[in-house]
Image (spheres, grey):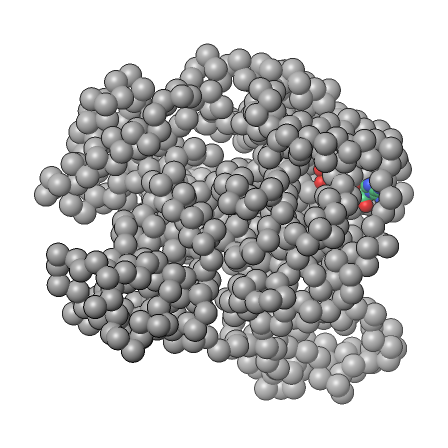
Amino acid sequence: MHYVDVILPLPLEGTFTYSVPEPMVAQVRMGVRVLVPLGRSKTYTAMAMRLHSEKPEFETRPIIQVIDAEPVLIEQQLRLWQWISTYYMSPIGDVFKAALPAGLKAEENYRPKTVRCVTLPANLRSEQSLHMALTILKRALKQHQTFSTYLELSHWNEIDGETPPAHIAEIACDELQNAANASDAVLRQLIQRNFLELYHREVGRLNTSGEYHPERIQPLSAAQQAAEDSICEQFNEKNVILLHGVTSSGKTEIYIHLIKKAIDEGKQVLYLLPEIALTVQMTRRLQNVFGSRLGIYHSKYSDAERVEIWKKQLSSEPYDVILGARSAVFLPFTRLGLVIVDEEHETSFKQQDPAPRYHARSTAIMLARMYEGAKVLLGTATPSMESYHNACTGKYGYVQLTTRYKDVAMPEIRVVDTKDLYHRKMMRGAFSPDLLEAMRTALRNKKQVLLFQNRRGFAPMVECKVCGWVPKCKNCDVSLTYHRSMNLLTCHYCGYTYPVPKQCPNCESTELLGRGYGTEKIEDRVRELFPEARIARMDLDTTRSAGAYGRIIDDFSCGRTDILIGTQMITKGLDFSGVTVVGILNADTMLNYPDFRAYEQAFQMLSQVSGRAGRRDERGLVILQTKSADLPVIQQVVAGDFQTFAHDLLEERSMFRYPPFYHLVYVYLRHRNEQLVDSAAIEMASRLRQAFADRVLGPDKPAVARVKTESIRKIVIKLEQGINLPLARQCMAEARTQLLQDKRYAAMTVFFDVDPS
Ligand SMILES: Nc1ncnc2c1ncn2[C@@H]1O[C@H](COP(=O)(O)OP(=O)(O)OP(=O)(O)O)[C@@H](O)[C@H]1O
Ligand SMILES: [Zn+2]
């Protein structure tokens, strides 16, 4: 009799053993998927690990079916899963769930999917007929507005006579509805009345176009060449190198040279970016050179597309270069030679929820270790303390680029003390006179402006003018954000929405005020202040559909918009030639964030967003508005003095026992009953103290102590370098198991966040 150990796509530790009916034995191998029964009536797609003939002690059930003829998982991937599961203390079943695209986990085989799109009917494709259409629609306000939005997004509004604009964008129904805030009914009416035409676009079209154009690679400047030489030389001794190059020093150009080198040697390259917003420009830059040898992989791609890329990577003709966000570390690579982690300092490389809570930078380093001779390059203008420390101690190689390409000067950063200006009533809303002046000058000179505000929505808070009542989420311990376009209050933690109250439930006053500024309100004010300017906004709300990123970024790159307002999405990695002014509306939310990384992140974000200014010839100007102008970190950003900043911060981290000198593990407990979670947390902490003594801090209430109706407690464990980590993990896991054996805590969620960000 044969047996197979399988991983189930469930939050369960370890593997499960099933028997294999004789006719299927020949088909079962590591990495093929098998259909298995579980419980009374469920079936799951499981991953076969090991075929053997060791009869288990317990009764086994037979597998139902072997799904794949060839494995969909290779050995290196499995080893990586195991490492993630162990290191991040996540069940292997959770790693399985995170790693595979849904289409490979589903019970039946996937079919190509389609996306609903709309286009302009042929009879409306002239300036005159569009004019008529808009006149007819005048009486149906919502339809008129939605139709106009379509014309804008697709660029049909730029039609001149009967000559269509040069670039017509394909617009998905979702994207249009989102942008115009239109209901299904409105869109249906437009289609029924023949103002728009519906069609279905098949997704899952992989990039197979474009030749390999190595001749398009730009020659490196002397400084860049020296950096590349140094990288190649240090790779002889080190597996990981930190490339620390100021913004616009041309790190990307160096990556392109290194990618070419790797693929010329028959190796594959994985290029990781922290954010999908960045893949748009990078795709264009890389595709221009690598053509169809480049594949792109991230969560905004449809599942069908992700399945196809996965399968292509297993075929005899895989992509040589994969550009992707976090989850691309899970793709199969047969001959990986180089991993580039761009913007390595970004905390979004760390997965927060759900498990596995892995850090893509560390995972990428582990992935490279699975391949003979594979190297890792970490690149950034503002290194993370972890990587910088590793470079200083010689664990990583270190290469610096201190000047911008073409020796363009670093931007001038002017700090504006808003506390003083508010006092003297000189602020116009969120805008200081300096910022307004700088924006005016830029627009007058036909240059572009980037405005950074780290809150989305209209007003981060609503308040009763009379009694100070603030609407809060009923599921979470947070105040609600007002979104004007939807005229709703929403919770950014659980996504729950509420109607805007007509009066205060506390004192019945009808004077409710929006307080503070979100990106939506900034956009509104900018439209009032600069009625002539073409304005766009990029935040979570405007980029819900896959095409939106590309459209907003392209429009700004080509100068079709003058002012771009955005959240952290616009702060790093983007390369715009026309931006001369960057406005940071309020640096204080970052500085006041209650976390040991607050200053590190503030330094990174402020330096990065400043780095978007003046990237071609003219020196850029950054207006940095803050109420804490005297903080040393602000001065260090202004001076571009990373060294002093890092030195001071590392000293502090060492003194107070924080990374990179200590490993940090957060233990979270969650339950609907606050008393229960309190007592469980106290008990868990005392169990942990038995093993870890004063390395354990807490339990405490985290900054947001209730999310989605569950109360949360947090315990912090600080482990010194050199401690026996496997043993420590075992102690932590045991403490958890023992706690959960108590019947009262059976429904408690207890999980670990290793190396939290
Ligand atoms: N050797 C070169 N030849 C031609 N153009 C270059 C060269 N090096 C850099 N550039 C151009 O200079 C600009 C800035 O370079 P790049 O975007 O690579 O900088 P970066 O170091 O990645 O910046 P950031 O950290 O801000 O993302 C780009 O438009 C790039 O095309
Ligand atoms: Zn909520």
Q: Observer-nearest residue: 298 or 522? A: 298
Does residue 484 lie above or below 48 as drawn?
above
The image shows residue 171, relative to residue 633, as above or below, that is below
Image quadrant where one finds the N terminus: bottom left
- Of residue 325 and residue 115, the one placed in the foreground of this image is 325
Image position of 174 (left or right of 256) = left
The reply to whether residue 497 is visible in this rendering is: yes
Q: Is residue 682 found left or right of 603 in the rendered image?
A: left
Q: Where is residue 68 in the image (x, y as percent from the top left)?
A: 41, 72
Name the residue at 57% across, 44% down: 372
Quadrant of residue 37 in the image? Answer: bottom left
Q: Which residue is drawn at 57% across and 25% down?
A: 395
Q: Where does the image place residue 458, in percent across and percent down from the top left?
A: 55, 47
Q: Can I make out residue 536 in this image?
A: no
Residue 424 is drawn in which quadrant? Answer: top right
* Residue at 87%, 77% in the rendered image: 163
Seen from the viewer's position, the closer of residues 237 and 301 is: 237
Q: Name the spot of residue 330 as percent of width and height, x first.
A: 49, 53
Left/right placement of residue 648 relative to residue 125 reads left
- The residue at the point 67 percent across, 27 percent down is 398
Number of marks present in the image shown:
0
Relative image position of residue 128 (x, y in whole percent): 83, 80
Outermost residue on the left side: it is 743
